[in-house]
Image: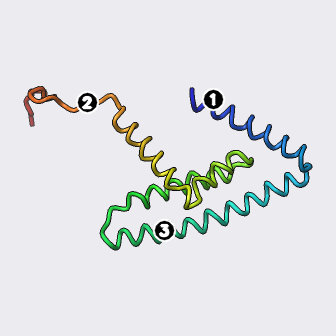
Amino acid sequence: MLLLTAFILVPVVEIWVIIQIGHVIGPWWTVLLLIADAVFGSWLVRHEGRRAWRALRTALEEGRIPSSELADGILLLVGGTLMLAPGFVTDLFGVLLILPMTRPLGRRLLARALARRLTGTGRTAPRPGHDDVIQGEVMN
């Protein structure tokens, strides 16, 4: 239900914002701004992607678990995808996920969401003495 709402609500908000900006600066400037935004987003993703790749390789060469580097890669992927969508609202969220100074917040939110997803599956740890063992016989 949340995904369906997002697929309906996000385009409506994007169109509304584009129309509002078009009223303020004019339609041609709005189109130019959208194109400039896409070019800037492409450059930013490429630049930060190289940086994240170098950090990942360094972590692996040092024998460290690259958890923050992998999280950065995920955030760059999602941010780049948001930058591909035409509109100012998705571009704003995309830039926030891509910029190095705002990515730590994104990393924390991602870690929290993953932890909630992993612990909220409804599965509980087995209680001592209550193993889920089914007695049976193997036949060849």
Q: Is mark 3 on a helix, strand or loop?
A: helix
Q: Would you say 132 lies left or right of 85 here?
A: left
C-beta proximity under 8 Å, tags 3 and 2: no
**First of labels 3, 2 by sequence position:** 3
Q: Name the residue under label 2.
A: 124
- 10 Å crowding of disc 3: few (<14), some (14-19), many (20+): some
Where residue 15 appears, as percent x and y from the top left, is: 79, 39
Q: Which residue corresponds to the image point at 75% horizontal and 41% vertical from the top-left? A: 14
**Residues at discs 2 and 1 in contact (Cβ within 8 Å):** no
Q: Where is residue 46 in the image (x, y as percent from the top left)?
A: 61, 66
Residue under the image location 89 percent in, 46 percent down: 24
Q: What residue type is labelled 2?
A: Thr
Considering the numbered disc 1 on the image, is that residue within a helix, a strand or a loop?
helix
- The local crowd at label 2, few if under 14, some if 14 to 19, many if 20 or more residues have their Cα within 10 Å, is few
Question: Is disc 2 placed on a helix, strand or loop?
Answer: loop
Percent coordinates x, y for residue 12 in the rendering: 75, 34
What x and y, as percent, mark residue 3?
A: 58, 32
The residue identified by callout 3 is 53
Which residue has dot 1 on it?
A: 5
Task: Please give left or right for residue 102 compared with residue 130 in the image.
Answer: right
Tell me the quadrant of the picture where the C terminus can be found: top left
